[in-house]
Image (spheres, helix red, strand yellow):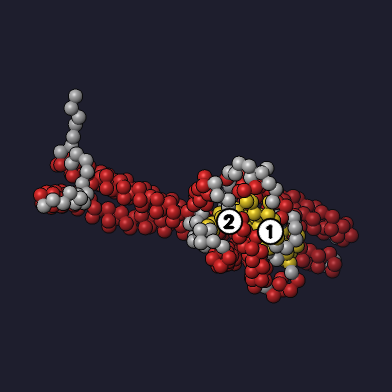
Amino acid sequence: MSSFHFTVAQKIAVGYLLVVVFCLAAIIYALTALGSLTRRSEQLVIHDFPAMILTRDLSQSLLDQERLEKQLLILRDISMVPLLDKRQEESGVIRSRLSSIPLQGRFVKVERLLADLDKARIEERTLLGQQQWADAEQFSEQVITPLNDQLLKALQEFHLGQERLLDETLHSFSRDSGKAYSLTFFLAFAGIGLAALVAVGIMLKIHRAFARLTQATKAIAAGSFDYPLGLEGQDEFGRLARDFAEMEQKLRELQAFNLDANPLTRLPGNLSIERELESRIASGLPFAHIYVDLDYFKAYNDRYGYQSGSDIISNVGIMIKEIVARLGNEQDMIGHIGGDDYVILSTPDRAEPLASEMIKKFDAIVPDFYSEQDRKVGYFKGQDRYGEEREFPLLSMSIAIVCSENLRNPSAEAIGRECAKMKEYLKKLPGSNYLIDRREKR
């Protein structure tokens, strides 16, 4: 049974139709994405941002009421009650505007506390109307004030949540809108042009292919049998397709390398580190796996911001490269796992000098990254991951060193486990430290 082959004319028609269909589908997708971004921007402008502003206004109004109420109870002036009622009416207007905004259940806790506070204020208003000042003052201290404090705290949490939501939405909006705009712009101009020129392009390629065949024939006739024809397969397109496939493979490998590199330090990432580690294990030659980690980096990042944290990551990368170039081997590899974690693959004899010098250099530069106040006292106060306030010392460096010659069956998994154990121990020690696992054949 003979196999079916497209003619050149059929290939031109199919190629043209594929380009047109692809461009139309991509444009529809881009327009759909733009529609989604529009809806998200409307949500941001109409609901989320006003909710944050109204929450702030409501908190201020509640504080004003609390101050006025305390003045009333101290002065015991019944003529101030209408003023307090007016403040409550202003809060009611703000609450009404907030209630009209769909907040998807994020305001339930505040609404419950507001309802409790309303009930309490009715009882208080009755006592004030009867001028039972002592009872009203006791009721305010025992009921109104605790409820008001809970409500203000809940409003603050809601406000912070709205700020985070707005920040995340704006970041994603900027990213997605840029992507959608670029895609639409590119397809609107390049796609239409491709669709119109594809037939002409294919014909020109066919012409060039025949020209190459003619040149190859002349070269072979002249005795040159290594002429780079550049054409493979059953026809012109099939032959060119193999070259494109090879080029794509090369580009894919190059892209994988570039994507693997860390954007801050431009050091190789996890894939390159794993390949190099497996290669060194397979060679059987002794090597040292040096794992570098920064202590209290998250607390620093929370206090000084993402940009300052990025500056530290970049500077530490530069510092490590300089030290390895000076004290290491030419074949040493420096990798950046991500965040504040680095890996150096060197020889056992260079491991300790490298670790010692890195800690010495790091401890010398780290104070420059802090404010004068934090640098002077040697720590700052902040919240840990559990929300508890504690004192965080200046950044320090922990270095865990595992040598392959000390392992009976060295593997990436075994080295990783040992480094994790050592890092856990090092983080319990004050200041910067390094530790070499000298146990043999375990």
Quadrant in the rendering for residue 293: bottom right
Closer to the camera in the image, 246 or 18:
246
Kind of residue at badge 1: Tyr
Quadrant in the rendering for residue 88: bottom right
Q: Position of residue 8 (x, y in %)?
A: 15, 42
Quadrant into which the C terminus falls? top right
Q: Earlier in the sequence, mark 2 or mark 1?
A: 2
Q: Position of residue 58 (x, y in %)?
A: 66, 60
Q: Residues within 10 Å of mark 2 (few under 14, many from 20)?
A: many
Q: Is residue 366 left or right of residue 6?
A: right
Q: Is residue 177 left or right of residue 114?
A: left
Please report the residue visible at 18 percent of the width from the left and 27 percent of the height from the top.
Answer: 2
Query: Is residue 173 shown to the viewer in this render?
Result: no
Please report the residue visible at 19 percent of the width from the left and 39 percent of the height from the top.
Answer: 234
Please report the residue visible at 17 percent of the width from the left and 49 percent of the height from the top.
Answer: 225
Query: Is residue 236 shown to the viewer in this render?
Result: yes
User: Which residue bears the numbered disc 1?
Assistant: 434
Q: Position of residue 332 (x, y in %)?
A: 53, 58
Under tag 1, what secondary structure?
strand
Give the number of the disc on residue 59.
none
Give the number of the disc on residue 347.
2
Is there CB contact under 8 Å for labels 2 and 1? no
Q: Position of residue 275 (x, y in %)?
A: 49, 48
Closer to the camera in the image, 137 or 113:
113
